[in-house]
């Protein structure tokens, strides 16, 4: 924070007086009685409205509190990572919803980062066709409501042909109106040479790539990483474990096997990813552009090649601008995943809303939603502040 | 709603001239990306233009591969004005045109004055009164309001009512008074930490419970309050950034002139701070107009919801895509022109300072 504005009479010459009361008085600042009055007013408002809520709940025959969470839910959830049925408790339904939110947010952030970074760099391309195309994409997705985009994606995934006439990409991805079918990675026991090859690659290539890509001096760290990878690979080889994929197979009327995503999940994930990718592309682009022209010119004068300039000079400086913005865009994506409720994907908000409607305990349901999102936000901003402080400290050392 | 729209640094180009065919590599890149674009966009173009049906009744659209724009022509009034009684639709039309004219007028910095502010402060309640028909009966309940005027009104009223609240919150957050500071921080962080949809649920479900047993608050009004509070938290953070951008010397100079806290803020600090964050406020407003579409989730007929409802007309069943694409174009036109204007204004303001 910058220096706070000193109000009249706040400045006291000399050393601060010792003592708890004086310290508290200093923390409290000027006009303590006005402050206490405001606090009392706020508390009175809360008590008044809270009292009304309790009275209303009493009139409706509801008991405030979270005891209802252990009751039988009696409603189904479209999809869930954990086993869930209508005979499970409300608490378990909420957990299923939370896990769905986490899943869509996690994959959304990952895919949006990859796509957004690519687009951001393409946006800076010399090639007019590429930069214009990316610009159009970004403007389109940032100037229309996300909810509208989600409606459109959801409609699109529901309008795909039936499994019998599925659209297939390379015979491994199938698009149908029952969902999207992808190959699923599975661990199989299969004695083979792949483990040995992987081990050799890990030992030889990882440090090489790491050093070439990032010019990392800390060789030791990379030795540790590659060592760990090598050990894993050797264990895998000795025990005959290996990675393979389970492919979806087209049957008569449906597809079996593989990883299937429901149309709702696919629509939500696509919508969130494409929307956030547009935001991230702008962040990456503005980050790269925030590095002054002089930096490019100086690096060119030193005889560095364009790719080296990007890697050694521009990206490290741009990352400082990019990282905090990227974090807030991840938070946005997670918060935006709550729009799932509008397209029928059972995320946390959607499940909590259903529970609120069926039990009448909407207050508790909303408190749970808000609590989860607040905790998440608080955690991320704490991490971000620590990161920023470390960055500032680094700057100070360098100066 | 944290946006990064502002940029103005020159693009560092690796090659002296931006080109399409200045090298073999670039030429190949141009051709291949053009090919990909055509492959992606051709089906879309066919759907939207070549195979589309432009006029006629619903029968003309049956069995057609392309878009049915005849649907939009037939349902245009519903999409724009929702369930507002058709014979009274001059009212929402008047409100929409009036707001658009005022917005255009306000976009010229040379018209910026206290008088313009007063005009806005009169115009927004007046728009509400015209829509409700309180002076000129018949009255129309807010349940029947909808479409574009609703989206515009809710966004603009949200912004206008959030502003004084946001100024107080921003000042409180930077004050030395610890209790006020903590209250402001708690309010701002709580609202910024939850999704808008949660705030709207509170407005829909909890606010009626929190009112005395006999009191009733209109549904649209409740949603409006939710949006105002939500926006005020974001606006307060923008204003705080503006306040922080001013050097401490400004405050000290004002105090040494004998101005009190409020006079200092009003005459010296806020005008400068506001000027610094006008582009950020505009970006927030654009985001707000797009975000009011969430009203559709709680069953208020905003522009997105009327588009959705239009496709449930038994005569024109299921033309969702056409409907959504049409309102997408409307939203895009508003939002894109506003963001271009913001860029223009930002450059102008910066030029005025230096």
Image (spheres, coloured by chain):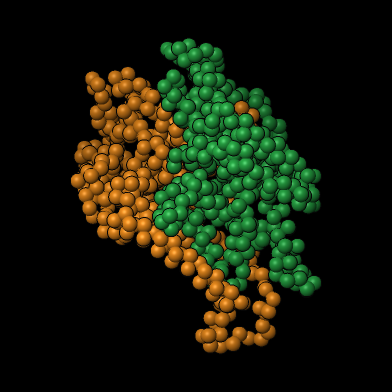
Residue nearer the viewer, B273 or A110: B273
Front-most of A229 and A314?
A314
Residue A365 at what x, y percent from top left? 35, 53
How many tags in the picture? 0
User: In the image, A239: left or right of B136?
Assistant: left
Q: Colour of chain A?
A: orange
The percent position of residue B28, horizontal first and vertical second, equals: 58, 23
Residue A369 horizontal/vertical position (percent): 39, 52
- Asked whether residue B114 is in view, the answer is yes
Residue at 51% x, 85% y: name it. A20
Determine the residue positioned at 26% across, 41% down.
Answer: A76
Q: Is residue B212 above or below residue A26?
A: above
Q: Is residue A63 left or right of residue B321?
A: left
Where, by quadrant of the figure, is residue A130 drawn?
top right
Q: Position of residue B59 (x, y in %)?
A: 45, 12
B274 lies above or below A249:
below
Q: Is residue A235 above or below residue A149?
A: below
Q: Is residue A235 visible?
A: no
């Amino acid at each position: 924070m910058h220096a706070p504005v000193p109000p009249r009479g706040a400045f006291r010459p000399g050393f601060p007086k010792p003592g708890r009361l004086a310290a508290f008085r200093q923390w409290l600042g000027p006009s303590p009685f006005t402050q206490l009055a405001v606090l009392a007013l706020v508390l009175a408002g809360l008590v008044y409205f809270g009292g009304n809520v309790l009275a209303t709940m009493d009139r409706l025959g509801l008991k405030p509190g979270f005891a209802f969470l252990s009751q039988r839910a009696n409603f189904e959830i479209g999809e869930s990572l954990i086993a869930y049925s209508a005979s499970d408790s409300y608490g378990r339904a909420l957990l299923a919803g939370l896990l769905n939110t986490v899943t869509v947010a996690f994959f959304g952030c990952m895919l949006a980062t990859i796509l957004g970074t690519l687009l951001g760099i393409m946006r800076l391309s010399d090639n007019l066709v590429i930069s214009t195309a990316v610009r159009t994409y970004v403007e389109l997705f940032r100037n229309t409501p996300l909810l509208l985009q989600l409606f459109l994606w959801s409609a699109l995934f529901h309008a795909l042909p039936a499994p019998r006439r599925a659209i297939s990409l390379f015979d491994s991805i199938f698009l149908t109106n029952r969902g999207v079918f992808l190959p699923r990675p599975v661990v199989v026991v299969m004695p083979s040479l792949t483990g040995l090859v992987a081990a050799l690659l890990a030992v030889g290539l990882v440090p090489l790539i790491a050093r070439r890509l990032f010019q990392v001096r800390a060789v030791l760290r990379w030795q540790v990483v590659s060592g760990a990878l090598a050990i894993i690979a050797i264990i895998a080889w000795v025990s005959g474990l290996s990675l393979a994929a389970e492919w979806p197979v087209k049957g008569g009327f449906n597809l079996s096997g593989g990883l299937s995503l429901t149309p709702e999940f696919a629509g939500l994930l696509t919508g969130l990813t494409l929307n956030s990718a547009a935001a991230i592309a702008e962040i990456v682009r503005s980050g790269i552009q925030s590095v002054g022209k002089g930096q490019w010119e100086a690096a060119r004068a030193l005889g560095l090649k364009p790719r080296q300039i990007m890697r050694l000079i521009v990206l490290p400086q741009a990352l400082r601008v990019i990282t905090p913005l990227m974090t807030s865009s991840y938070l946005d994506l997670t918060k935006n995943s709550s729009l799932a409720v509008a397209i029928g994907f059972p995320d946390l908000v959607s499940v909590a809303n259903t529970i609120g409607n069926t039990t009448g305990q909407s207050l508790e349901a909303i408190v749970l939603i808000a609590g989860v999102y607040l905790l998440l936000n608080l955690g991320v901003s704490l991490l971000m502040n620590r990161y920023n402080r470390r960055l500032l400290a680094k700057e100070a050392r360098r100066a | 709603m944290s946006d990064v729209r502002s940029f103005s640094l020159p693009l560092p180009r690796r090659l002296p001239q931006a080109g399409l065919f200045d090298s073999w590599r670039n030429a190949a890149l141009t051709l291949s990306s053009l090919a990909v674009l055509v492959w992606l966009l051709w089906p879309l173009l066919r759907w939207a233009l070549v195979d589309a049906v432009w006029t006629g009744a619903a029968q003309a659209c049956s069995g057609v591969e392309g878009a049915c724009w005849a649907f939009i022509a037939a349902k245009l009034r519903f999409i724009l004005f929702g369930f507002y009684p058709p014979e009274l639709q001059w009212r929402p039309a008047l409100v929409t045109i009036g707001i658009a004219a005022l917005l255009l007028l306000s976009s010229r910095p040379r018209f910026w004055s206290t008088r313009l502010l007063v005009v806005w402060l009169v115009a927004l309640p007046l728009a509400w009164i015209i829509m409700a028909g309180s002076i000129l009966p018949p009255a129309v309940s807010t349940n029947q309001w909808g479409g574009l005027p609703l989206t515009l009104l809710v966004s603009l009223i949200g912004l206008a009512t959030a502003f004084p609240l946001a100024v107080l919150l921003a000042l409180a957050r930077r004050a030395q008074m610890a209790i006020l500071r903590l209250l402001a921080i708690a309010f701002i962080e709580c609202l910024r930490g939850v999704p808008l949809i949660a705030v709207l649920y509170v407005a829909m479900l909890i606010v009626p419970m929190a009112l005395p047993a006999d009191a009733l608050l209109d549904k649209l009004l409740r949603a409006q309050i939710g949006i105002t509070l939500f926006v005020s938290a974001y606006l307060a953070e923008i204003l705080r950034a503006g306040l922080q951008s001013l050097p401490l010397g400004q405050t000290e100079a004002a105090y040494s002139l004998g101005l009190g806290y409020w006079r200092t803020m009003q005459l010296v600090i806020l005008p400068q701070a506001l000027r610094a964050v006008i582009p950020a406020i505009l970006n927030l407003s654009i985001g707000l107009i797009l975000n009011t579409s969430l009203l559709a989730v709680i069953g208020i007929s905003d522009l997105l919801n009327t588009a959705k409802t239009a496709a449930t007309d038994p005569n024109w069943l299921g033309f969702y895509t056409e409907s959504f694409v049409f309102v997408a174009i409307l939203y895009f036109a508003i939002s894109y022109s506003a963001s271009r204007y913001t860029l223009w204004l930002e450059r102008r303001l910066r030029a005025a300072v230096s």
